[in-house]
Image (cartoon, rainbow, N blue to C red):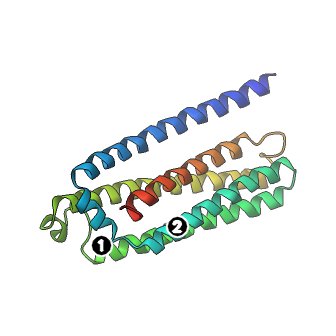
Amino acid sequence: MEKRKDVFGTKFGMWLFIFSEIMLFAGLFVLYAAYFTKYKADFVASGKELNIVFGTVNTVILLTSSFFVAASVTAVRRKTDKTAIIFLGLALLSGALFLTNKYFEWGHKIEAGIYPNSPALVGGPPGKNIFFVLYYVITGLHGLHIIIGMVLLGISALLVWKKRVHAGNYAILDNAGLYWHLVDVVWIFIFPLFYLIL
C-alpha cells in the first residue's frame, strides 16, 4: 500500500510540474496571439520566410519519437528491457535530429541577418521584428525542453539497463515519457503558429 501511495505521489507531482510547463507556454502563445492581432500582415509575411520543410520534418521526427517513448514503457512492462533500451535510444536519436535541424534552421536565418533586433529587422516593419523575437524565444525555450527531455530519457535508459527500472517499478520512465509527450504536444502548437500562419 505504501508503494502505491509513493507511485501516486510521484505521478501527481509530475502532473503538477507538467501543468506549470503548460501555463508557461500558454502565456507565450497568448502573447503571440495579442501581437498577431495587432500585426497580422507582418506576421503572415514573416511566417512565409520560414522553411516549412524544416518544420514539417521536425514535426514528423517528434511524433515518431513519442511512439518510441511509449513503446519503451510498454516494453518495460512486458519485461523486455533490451527492447525498451533500443526504443529509448531511438527516441534520443530523434531528439538529436530535431535539435540538429533546428541548429541549421537558426544558422541559416542568422546568416541571413534575421535575428531579434538585427539591422535587417529593426529597419523593417515592427511586426516582423516581434514575430522573430517570439520565434526565437518560443522555439529556443522548446529546444531547451528537448534537451531536458533527452537527459531524462537517457537517465531512464541507464536505469533500465541497471535493472533499477523494471516491470514492477517504472515510475521514473513513465514520468520521463510524460515530459517527452508534453514537449511533442507543445511543438504541435508551435508548428502551425509559425510555419503554417495564414
Q: Is residue 37 left or right of residue 167?
A: left
- Residue 187, image x, y percentages: 49, 56
Numbered disc 2: secondary structure:
helix
Instruction: State whether residue 54 appears in this view.
Output: yes
Quadrant location of the N terminus in the rendered image: top right
**What's the mark number on residue 110?**
1
Task: Decide which of 96, 182 is in the foreground and name it.
Answer: 182
Check disc 2: other Cα within 10 Å, few if <14, some if 14-19, many if 20+.
Answer: many
- Mark 1 belongs to which amino acid? Ile
Label 1 or label 2, whichever lies nearer to me, is: 2
Specify the quadrant of the image occupied by residue 66.
Answer: bottom right
Q: Is residue 190 left or right of residue 63?
A: left
- Residue 132, image x, y percentages: 29, 61
- Residue 131, image x, y percentages: 28, 59
Which badge, 1 or 2, comes first in the chain's sequence?
2
Which residue is denoted by mark 2 in the rendering?
58
